[in-house]
Image: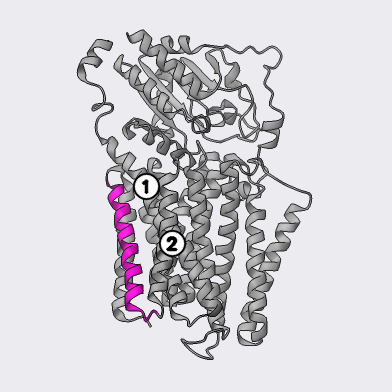
Amino acid sequence: MQTPVIQLAYLASAALFIVGLRRMQSPATARRGNQLAAGGMLVAVLATLFLYDILSPWMMILGLLIGGGIGAVLARQVEMTAMPELVAVFNGFGGLASALVALAEVAQYAGDSAILAPGAELAAGTAFTVVLSVLIGMVTCSGSFVAYGKLSGRLSGNPVAFVGMRTATLGVLGGAVFFGGVFVASAAAAAWLTIPSVVLLSLGALALGILLVVPIGGADMPVVVALLNSYSGLAAAATGFVLGNIALIVSGTLVGAAGFILTVIMCEAMNRSLVNVLTGGFGGEEGAAGAAAEAPEGRTVGETSPDDTAILTSYADQVIIVPGYGLAVAQAQHPLREIAELLEERGVTVKYAIHPVAGRMPGHMNVLLAEANVPYDSLFEMEEINGEFAQTDVALVVGANDVVNPAAREPGNDISGMPILNVDEAQTVVMMKRSLSPGYSGVDNALFYADNTKMLFGDAKESTDAIASELKALGA
Amino acid sequence: MQNFIVFVLSAFLGNEILSKVPQTLHTPLMSGANAISGITVVGALVAAGMSGGGWSSWLGFFALVVATINVVGGFLVTDRMLQMFAKKQRPSGGEAEPQGVKAGAK
């Protein structure tokens, strides 16, 4: 039972989570914040382990060691470029765990091992929170693993759709809600229905998670990952309601809020509603298959070489680098930072402009550049830097496309109204790209054919390496 | 009812604290928050440790392992990321490039 001491310990860990998250407001204090939050978790686990009447403490410690070992290995081995996948996987585990705890609670009530309160009935209120916990937890789990598949390239990043998909999704949702209802009703009236209905609810929720994420394209993954993050928090909060545990409710809700805020920020950055993102089918297929790699009639493309780019940038006063997902794919963050340093040595001001949805998760570019030792005070958010492009000599676009596409300013296409980085205002734009194919949105980019744009075709890593060595040669 | 009050107040609190997190830290925020959602490990300990066996304790044990992966992995990977952010408070390239090289390049 929950003694006052345990309650106090939970209160302490919730307070540590809050203080820890608050410190995430600045890069200087964030690391300490994360450690405080981890400390809060330790307090909660130790309090539970030693203050509850745990029947099999060694078994529990074994479980903690197994899970901790797997988690530590995953965390140590992951490449920074694979961070979106890992976050998705951890999310999935979080959701799964919450759902399993709720299921274990059901198993206990169902008389499987009614030690706590023999013959106790599942109250309708509790049964309702079990349904929420299982539903959200399982959707988070399967949805996160589909997101993992898409982010890691094991599944196609294109939106997948089949005829009647929306009907199927609604049908599965209806089924899950129906079995949830049966479960709540059976808790009081027909105990034999409890287990079958909760199992069907779980399966339905798993299928629902898959159906919800499969139709969403790769470029919309930042929204999906943030939303699933929010769900994993809500699942923990729902489990907190099931168990009447304040620690779970407070922390789960905090996480839910964090994920929700990020989701809203991502949607605003694309000028699309959440519903629009979730109903999916945006871009992808056409963009990849129709790849118009040739310039349309009457429009010419200016090409440039790494050597020319090196010379151009070295005589500039200010260069703004605009990274995108292509940077992550090519792993070009290190040579890019080298270029920036070489330019700075020559007295060129170098800034980085980060679009909120560049990459595959919120803040993806910032992590990559941090890994390459780019100082975070040279990274600028869109609103801060957009006014500066007009006074900039060279905008160096590395593997970004839709976030710099001027078509967003015109009505009548898929990205209309999306806030973009105004790179076209710079004196010269150098775009490093493999081809002239449009981005994920499938909207052709007029920037390719602009008079002040030079295309530098090829792999971003090779191009940046070549520019860096040319700059070195110039400096010598 | 009490639980519900806590839930609503936490939602407001979370909104208040977290909407001020800068874009630079969005990924660590997400993975750190994710680790915190592994608080469900507490529920798993109760579920697995307090039932006498059978389905309930196996489900709980599985939940315990999975939740711990989330907690330990989440906090460690966030720490790894934040370490990279923190070490760049020093002026750029200061430690790597000796002054002489800088002057020579001009």
Hey, which residue is sitting farthest bottom in the picture?
Answer: A119
Q: CA distance from mark 2 to mark 1?
A: 33 Å
Dot 2 lies on which element?
helix
User: Looking at the rendering, in which quadrant would you find the N terminus of chain A?
Assistant: bottom left
Dot 1 lies on which element?
loop
Which residue occupies the foreground of this view, A143 or A321? A143
In the rendered view, how is the structure colored? one colour
Q: Residue at x 56, y 84 (%)?
A: A112
A338, above or below A22, in the image: above
A201, above or below A194, in the image: above
A96, above or below A101, in the image: above
On the image, the x and y values in percent for residue A254 come to 41, 60
Q: Residue at x 78, y 53 (%)?
A: A164
Hey, which residue is sitting farthest right in the picture?
Answer: A163
User: Looking at the rendering, in which quadrant would you find the C terminus of chain A?
Assistant: top left
Which residue occupies the foreground of this view, A84 or A276? A84
Write down the chain letter for disc 2. Answer: A
Q: Which residues lie in the magenta part?
A: A29-54
Q: Amino acid at mark 2?
A: Ile
On the image, the x and y values in percent for residue B100 come to 20, 15
Q: Residue at x 49, y 48 (%)?
A: A86
> Badge 2 is on which residue?
A66
> Badge 1 is on which residue?
B21
On the image, the x and y values in percent for residue B63 come to 49, 67
Q: Is residue B47 visible?
A: yes
On the image, the x and y values in percent for residue A343 come to 35, 17
A469, above or below A423, in the image: above
Q: Does the magenta segment cover residue A33?
A: yes
